[in-house]
């Protein structure tokens, strides 16, 4: 039965995921992390219609100058040196982040990861300086900005609230940067309906990344637990059944978390092999946790 081997973290190991990009050892010249994309478009599970929209965005970025010259777009449609915006929106866990990586990989560019929380600064004008820095770095290095949780910074402007003036200034500054910076910006948003209309108009591609279909869920389960190192009980395991249990409620990010728990059970010797029933139990636990986090009553078991 496979078990984990003890290991000791070596000095000089990579920074912990989620650490501040300003202190990351792989940071670029402006101080923000520049990440090599790992995922290609062919390696991620997306509906074909979504992949087609993503490919259209990639094609535009690849041939932008050619299109501008051929159809004389600079005067009629394009605004100066404005950025190219790609907004990936949809429920959490549906693959927006890895789709951003796939776009960068197709364009042979690095990603500057600028999460909303990393951009915020408590000092007066500090957030605007952070935003300017990340756009300047992208301009200098040719990298793509990936702004995750972007609905937090692109929400509707309002006159209500103690910090409304400051928040509106930050949004106005970001609008100015998108109008004056010749860079590619990929946004990931879970709350698309909250985005200010001014940002909506400045983003060329709005691509919905929906919850996976039953067929895609089966493919996602195979992707995450298909390894031969995760033995399955013969005659007691079905990817199709797992997909049916997950349909409409789980996305790729959820499946990844459940798969990690199954790896622990096998790796630590808690079970010899995975069965559909075992995965069902983990799915039900996960769904219960989701329901609890939303304050929902009751649980529909699979």
Image (cartoon, rainbow, N blue to C red):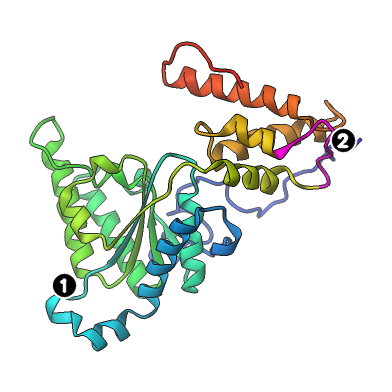
Find the residue positioned furthest to the top.
298
Q: Secondary structure at mark 2?
A: loop
Instruction: Estimate the x, y position of residue 107 in percent, counting from the top left.
Output: 46, 73
Q: Verify whether residue 49 appears in magenta.
A: no
Instruction: Estimate the x, y position of residue 202 in percent, counting from the top left.
Output: 21, 60
Instruction: Estimate the x, y position of residue 116 in percent, counting from the top left.
Output: 34, 46
Circle 1 packing at 10 Å, graded few (<14), some (14-19), many (20+), is: few
Residue closer to the observer: 33 or 219 = 219
Residue closer to the observer: 175 or 259 = 259
Q: Image height check: is 124 above or below 261? A: below
CB within 8 Å, label 1 to label 2? no
Determine which quarter of the picture holds residue 193: top left
Total tally of numbered discs in the picture: 2
Taking 96 as reference, is 150 left or right?
Answer: left
| Gap in angstroms between the C-alphas marked 1 and 2 | 61 Å
In the picture, the quarter occupied by the C terminus is top right
In the picture, the quarter occupied by the N terminus is top right
Q: Image height check: is 100 above or below 78? A: above
Determine which quarter of the picture holds residue 203: bottom left
Name the mark on residue 234. Answer: 2
Specify the segment rendered in magenta: 228-239
Assign the magenta stretch its main secondary structure.
loop
Circle 2 packing at 10 Å, graded few (<14), some (14-19), many (20+), is: few
Q: Residue at x 50, y 74 (%)?
A: 108
Instruction: Estimate the x, y position of residue 188 in percent, counting from the top left.
Output: 38, 50
Q: Residue at x 44, y 58 (%)?
A: 49
């Amino acid at each position: 039965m496979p078990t984990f081997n003890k290991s000791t973290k070596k000095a000089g190991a990579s920074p912990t995921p989620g650490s501040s990009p300003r202190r990351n050892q792989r940071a670029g010249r402006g101080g923000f992390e520049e990440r090599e994309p790992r995922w290609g478009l062919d390696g991620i599970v997306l509906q074909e219609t979504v992949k087609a929209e993503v490919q259209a965005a990639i094609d535009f970025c690849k041939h932008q100058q050619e299109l501008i010259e051929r159809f004389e777009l600079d005067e009629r449609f394009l605004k100066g040196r404005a950025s190219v915006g790609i907004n990936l929106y949809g429920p959490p866990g549906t693959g927006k982040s890895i789709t951003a990586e796939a776009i960068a990989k197709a364009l042979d560019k690095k990603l500057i990861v600028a999460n909303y929380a990393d951009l915020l600064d408590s000092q007066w004008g500090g957030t605007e300086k952070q935003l300017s820095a990340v756009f300047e770095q992208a301009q200098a290095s040719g990298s793509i900005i990936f702004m995750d949780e972007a609905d937090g910074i692109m929400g509707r402007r309002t006159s209500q609230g103690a910090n409304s003036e400051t928040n509106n200034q930050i949004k106005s500054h970001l609008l100015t940067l998108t109008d004056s910076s010749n860079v590619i910006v990929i946004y990931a948003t879970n709350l698309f309906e909250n985005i200010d209309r001014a940002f909506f108009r400045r983003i060329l591609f709005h691509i919905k990344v929906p919850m996976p279909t039953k067929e895609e869920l089966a493919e996602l389960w195979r992707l995450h637990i298909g390894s031969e190192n995760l033995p399955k009980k013969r005659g007691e395991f079905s990817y199709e059944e797992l997909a049916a249990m997950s349909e409409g409620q789980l996305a790729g990010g959820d499946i990844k978390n459940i798969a990690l728990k199954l790896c622990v059970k096998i790796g630590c010797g808690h079970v010899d092999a995975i069965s559909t029933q075992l995965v069902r139990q983990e799915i039900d636990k996960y769904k219960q946790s989701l329901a609890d986090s939303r304050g929902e009553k009751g649980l529909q078991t699979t």
